[in-house]
C-alpha cells in the first residue's frame, strides 16, 4: 500500500480520470486516483444496459486518448451525426485510460478503495475488500472528483411510497421486466425518462400503451447543434443563436421563446410551458417519436403508488396490476452549489465551461500544472453549476462567455484549449473559410457582449466580484 502521493484524486469517473490524465501530461508529479467502485468509469459502470452518451464521443473522455473513431453514423436515430459510445464502450474506454495512466509510472488507480477523510496521520482510505484502513500522506492536494456525483437509477431509491404488489423497476431492469402486450407508466421528466420511452417505442410498444408521468416539461437542444469536427459549424451556429437570443431577451420567458424560434431548443409539447433545462439533447427522430405519447400526466411529483391508483402532488390517476412502472426519477446531474475550485490543499472539480465535464476536469489539471496562485487559478476557472431550470440559463451562459474571454489573454492556456480533443470547437479553424461558419462566427461576435450584459441582468447578479475570487455568493449557489 502506498504511503504518500502528491495528489490524491477521489473518484475514478470521467472527471477524476480526465483531471489526472491532463495533470500527469503537464507536470512531473505523482498522482493516485481512488474509487470505491470495483472498476474505473464512475456512474457508467452501473448505467442501464441501453444507455449511450447523449453527446458525441469525439469530445468525451480523457484528453490523451480518443473515444471511438470519430465516425458519422449512417443508420438509426443518430444517422448523419457523430457516433455516441454505449455505456459498455465508455467503461472499456475508461479501463484502458486508467491502464495507460498507470503505465506512465507516475500514477496509480486504486479501485475498491473508499476515501474516509483526513485522519491524524494523513488521508484515510479503506480497502473495501479487507476493511483495512490505510493512511496516505498527501504532499500537495486532495482532489474532490466526486463533488458533482449525481444519483443514478442503479443506486437510487424511489422517492415515493410503493404498495406491496405494485410492479416498479428502475430503468436498468426495464429490458428484463418488459412483456409483450404490457402497459407502462414512465415516471420522470428528464433524459432517463426520455431514454425509457424511446426504448419502449423502439421495442414495438404502441404509444397508447405508455403513460408518461412528467412533473415538469423540459427544453432540449436539437442534436444537430452539438456536432464537432467536420460539422463544427453546427456548434458555432448554436453558440451564435444563444448569443443572439441572449442579447435581445426581454425576460426569461422571452429568452426561451427566442431560442425555440431560432431552432436552438425544442420541447416535446410546444403548447405546454417548459421550465426544466438540464442541457440534454434530442434528434428530430427522437422528438417525433416522443410526441406520439399522448397520455402525459402533469400533476406534479408522485407521492405514492397504490394497487389501483397513483397519488401525485396535485391529484391522482389510475393504475393497475398490468402496468409496469419505470422509475426514472434519479437526478443524473448534481445540483451541488458552487464552491471555489482551488482551495488550500484541495481542488473541487466542477463545471467551468457549461456542460463539459471532461473538458473542464482536464482544464483544471492544466491550470494546476501551470499556475501557482490560487486567486489566478480561480479567476480562470470560476465554478459554473449545472443548470436545472430555465432560470439558471442566463448565469450559466454568461459565465461561460466571460470565462472564455479571460482565457484569450493567456497564450499557453489558449493554445492548450485550441488543441484539446475535449474542446468541442477544436476543428473550427479548419472550417473558418466556409460561408455558414463565417456567418455563425459573425453573428456570435455581433451579439456576445450584449448577451453577457443582458444575461447578467436577467440573472440578477451584475457584479462578478465573488466569481473573480472563486467565492461565488448566494446568487451563484444554486
Ligand atoms: C446517464 C448519463 C449520461 C450522461 N451522458 C453525458 C454525455 O453524453 N456527455 C457529457 O458530457 N456528460 C454526460 N453525462 C454527465 C456525466 O455526469 C458526466 O459525463 C460524467 O460521466 C460524470 O463523471 P464524474 O467523474 O464527474 O462523476 P461519477 O461518474 O459519478 O464519478 C464519481 C466517482 O466518485 C466515486 N466516489 C464517491 N465518493 C467516494 C469516496 N468517498 N471514496 C472513493 N470514491 C468515491 C464514485 O464511486 C464514482 O465512481 C451523463 C450523465 C448520466 C447520468
Image: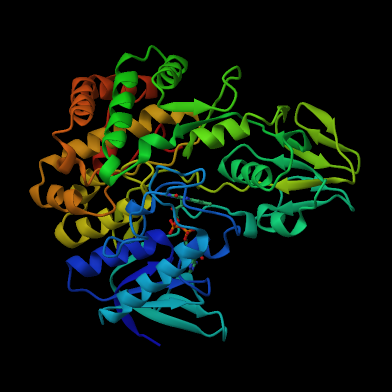
Which quarter of the image is occupied by the N terminus?
bottom left
Using the image, determine if residue 34 lies above or below residue 387. Answer: below
Residue extending farthest front: 74
Residue appearing at x 29%, y 18% in the figure: 247
Tell me residue 100's x, y (percent): 31, 75
Along the viewing direction, whichever of 406 and 214 lies nearer the viewer: 214
The picture quadrant where one finds residue 213 is top right
- Of all residues, the one furthest to the top in this rendering is 250
The chosen color scheme is: rainbow
Identify the residue at image location x=42%, y=17%: 261
Q: For residue 120, what is the image quadrant?
A: bottom left
- The residue lying toward the viewer, choosing from 325 and 449, is 325
Q: Residue at x 51, y 43 (%)?
A: 77
Residue 144 visible in the snapshot: no
- Seen in the picture, residue 85 relative to 1 is either above or below; the reply is above
Q: Residue 272: image x %, image y %?
A: 61, 19
Q: How many marks?
A: 0
> Within the image, what quadrant is residue 239 found in?
top left
Q: Give the percent coordinates (x, y) of residue 372.
A: 15, 58
Q: Position of residue 307 (x, y in %)?
A: 91, 44
Q: Seen in the image, is 192 located left or right of residue 477?
A: right
Residue shown at 45% from the left, 59% from the top = 146
- 41 or 126: nearer the eye? 41
**Residue 22 makes an appearance in the image:** yes
Amino acid at each position: 500500500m502506498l504511503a504518500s502521493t502528491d495528489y490524491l484524486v477521489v473518484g475514478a469517473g470521467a472527471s477524476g480520470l480526465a483531471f489526472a490524465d491532463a495533470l500527469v501530461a503537464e507536470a512531473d508529479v505523482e498522482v493516485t486516483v481512488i474509487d470505491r467502485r470495483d472498476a474505473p468509469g464512475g456512474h457508467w459502470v452501473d448505467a442501464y444496459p441501453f444507455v449511450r452518451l447523449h453527446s458525441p464521443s469525439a469530445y468525451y473522455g480523457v484528453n490523451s486518448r480518443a473515444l471511438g473513431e470519430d465516425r458519422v453514423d449512417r443508420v438509426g436515430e443518430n444517422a448523419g451525426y457523430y457516433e455516441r459510445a454505449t455505456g459498455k464502450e465508455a467503461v472499456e474506454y475508461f479501463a484502458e485510460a486508467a491502464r495507460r495512466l498507470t503505465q506512465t509510472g507516475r500514477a496509480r488507480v486504486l479501485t475498491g478503495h473508499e476515501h474516509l477523510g483526513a485522519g491524524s496521520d494523513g488521508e484515510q482510505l479503506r480497502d473495501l475488500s479487507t476493511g483495512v484502513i490505510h493512511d496516505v500522506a498527501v504532499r500537495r492536494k486532495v482532489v474532490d472528483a466526486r463533488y458533482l456525483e449525481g444519483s443514478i437509477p442503479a443506486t437510487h431509491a424511489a422517492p415515493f411510497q410503493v404498495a406491496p404488489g405494485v410492479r416498479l423497476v428502475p430503468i436498468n431492469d426495464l429490458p428484463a421486466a418488459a412483456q409483450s402486450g404490457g402497459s407502462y407508466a414512465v415516471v420522470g421528466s428528464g433524459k432517463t425518462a426520455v431514454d425509457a420511452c424511446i426504448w419502449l417505442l423502439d421495442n414495438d410498444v404502441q404509444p397508447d400503451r405508455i403513460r408518461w408521468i412528467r412533473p415538469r416539461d423540459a427544453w432540449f437542444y436539437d442534436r444537430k447543434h452539438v456536432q464537432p469536427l467536420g460539422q463544427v459549424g453546427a456548434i458555432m451556429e448554436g453558440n451564435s443563436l444563444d448569443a443572439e437570443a441572449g442579447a435581445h431577451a426581454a425576460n426569461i420567458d422571452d429568452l426561451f421563446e427566442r431560442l425555440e424560434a431560432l431552432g436552438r431548443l425544442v420541447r416535446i409539447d410546444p403548447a405546454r410551458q417548459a421550465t426544466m433545462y438540464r442541457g440534454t439533447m434530442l434528434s428530430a427522430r427522437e422528438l417525433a417519436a416522443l410526441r406520439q405519447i399522448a397520455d402525459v400526466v402533469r400533476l406534479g411529483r408522485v407521492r405514492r403508488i397504490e394497487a389501483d391508483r397513483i397519488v401525485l402532488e396535485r391529484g391522482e390517476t389510475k393504475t393497475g396490476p398490468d402496468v409496469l412502472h419505470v422509475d426514472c426519477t434519479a437526478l443524473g446531474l448534481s445540483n451541488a452549489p458552487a464552491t471555489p475550485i482551488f482551495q488550500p490543499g484541495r481542488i473541487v472539480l466542477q463545471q467551468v465551461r457549461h456542460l463539459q465535464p471532461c473538458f473542464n476536469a482536464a482544464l483544471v489539471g492544466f491550470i494546476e500544472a501551470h499556475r501557482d496562485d490560487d486567486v489566478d487559478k480561480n479567476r480562470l476557472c470560476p465554478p459554473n453549476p449545472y443548470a436545472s431550470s430555465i432560470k439558471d440559463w442566463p448565469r450559466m451562459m454568461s459565465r461561460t462567455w466571460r470565462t472564455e474571454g479571460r482565457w484569450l489573454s493567456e497564450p499557453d492556456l489558449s493554445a492548450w484549449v485550441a488543441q484539446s480533443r475535449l474542446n468541442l470547437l477544436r476543428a473550427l479553424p479548419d472550417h473558418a473559410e466556409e460561408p455558414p461558419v463565417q456567418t455563425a462566427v459573425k453573428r456570435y461576435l455581433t451579439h456576445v457582449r450584449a448577451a453577457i450584459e443582458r444575461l447578467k441582468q436577467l440573472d440578477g447578479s451584475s457584479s462578478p466580484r465573488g466569481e473573480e475570487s472563486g467565492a461565488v455568493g448566494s446568487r451563484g449557489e444554486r
